[in-house]
Image: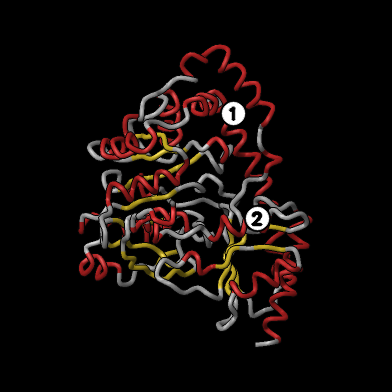
Amino acid sequence: MSEMWHYSRRALMMKSSIIREIIKIAKKPGVISFSGGFPAPELFPKAELAEISQRVLLEQGENALQYSTTEGYPLLREFIAGMLKKQGINISPDEILITGGSQQGLDLCGKVFLDWGDCVVSARPTYLGAIQAFNAYFPKYVTLPSDDDGMTIDGLKEILEMNNPRLIYLVPSFQNPDGRTIPLHRRTRILELAETYGVPVIEDDPYSVLVYEGTVPSPMKAMSPANVVMLGTFSKLLSPGLRIAWLVAPRGVIDKFVRMKQGTDLHTNTLGQYIIYEFAKDGGLYEHIERIKTLYAKRLKILIQAMEHYFPPEVKFSRPNGGLFLWVELPEGVNATELLPKAVEKNVAYIPGSAFYPDGGGHNTMRLNYSKPNEDEIEEGIKKLAEVFQEALSNK
């Protein structure tokens, strides 16, 4: 009978994530995967979390296994507020909403700000998960190209004047997919224009604490508290499987997010919130982040060295100093999507860059992740990718 059912336009128009599909390929035995943004599984603090889980269940099980408030576990929100204060963001726990991963936060932003046909401003490229979340609300995208310093701002004033956008979406620090960071002077100008035209900025910030060399500029939320909605997550800092993240919005706005979340899932996983708080409260999270940074900095260095050594000189790539991703640009006319099956034949996988362009383009680009593959896999995988590139360039 299902062939007779009537489906919503939303259900008919939504497409599957290319990342989810490629990750299925990448899980085949022997495939070296630069595709997913997976944390290194050997860093998961399994023993500590097992001990904490047992303690929480025995000592606080009546609450940890029960329904909870939509806003989230108060002690965890207090911890997040303290963590953000170290970054110059002075907020109350009442301005924090615990979400089921940052993806839910992105979906809530769509629910709160977007109606059919509304305009979203973003970088080109930008995070695919945000594109997917916003697409459910059928916006139009107006994008600005990126250079080595992230989204350019020439023309932003005219875009805001002519398109009346409902939000500006950015991953300003170590952006997924290209690893680029927007410098302070650009952040300042973006915020000045956003405030002038009354457009909220969605600052998606999973990576800014994962800096391996130098520093990152102040968070945009610290620079413009009243005009920025900020998303953060424990997925890249502790465990994606727990699906615990947070959304920070100004007073008077956070209530709208809470109401939208109530209609979605009532509240986020209570047990996971208790476990993360117990792990984090006495400095355990900060110690764990330092372990993560040590390993990822090593893997990033090996990746860049391998690319410098093996890649043809015509192939360009970004050089981030933090985060999880790096961007590769092939010569015009070389299609990264068409090359993917040839790479998989050599047991290596990546994400074609065109998936990160909400209004089309980027066919000669790709995203590489370096947190999941180990050092030997990085070296071997880049060597195999270089062979694929060289064959493509020879046939061009």
Q: Nearer the viewer, residue 88 or 391?
A: 391
Rendering coords of residue 94 (x, y %):
32, 30
Q: Tell me the residue at 23%/67% (across/down).
A: 163
In the current view of this chain or complex, which residue is farthest to the front?
A: 1
Scheme of image coloration: secondary structure
Amino acid type assigned to the residue bearing label 1 in the image: Gly
Q: Give left or right: position of 196 versus 83.
A: left
Rendering coords of residue 83 (x, y %):
46, 34
Q: Tell me the residue at 60%/22% (across/down).
A: 53
Q: Give left or right: position of 73 versus 162.
A: right
Identify residue for label 2: 370
Q: Secondary structure at mark 1?
A: helix
Q: Which quadrant holds the C terminus? A: bottom right
Distance (Cα) linking label 1 and label 2: 24 Å
Q: Residue 385 sits in which quadrant?
A: bottom right
User: From the viewer's perspective, is residue 301 above or below residue 241?
Assistant: below
Q: Nearer the viewer, residue 6 or 175?
A: 6
In this view of the protein, can residue 154 be seen by the observer?
Answer: yes
Q: Secondary structure at mark 2?
A: loop
The disc, 1 or 2, on the residue closer to the chain's N-terminal end is: 1
Q: Nearer the viewer, residue 9 or 364?
A: 9
Identify residue for label 1: 284
Rendering coords of residue 220 (x, y %):
37, 50
Amino acid type assigned to the residue bearing label 2 in the image: Tyr
Q: Nearer the viewer, residue 95 or 364?
A: 364
Q: Which mark is residue 141?
A: none
Give the foreground label among 1 and 2.
2
Q: Residue 351 sits in which quadrant?
A: bottom right
Check if mark 1's residue and mark 2's residue have beta carbons within 8 Å.
no
User: From the viewer's perspective, is residue 145 above or below residue 232?
Assistant: below
Crowding at mark 1 (Cα within 10 Å: few <14, some 14-19, many 20+): some
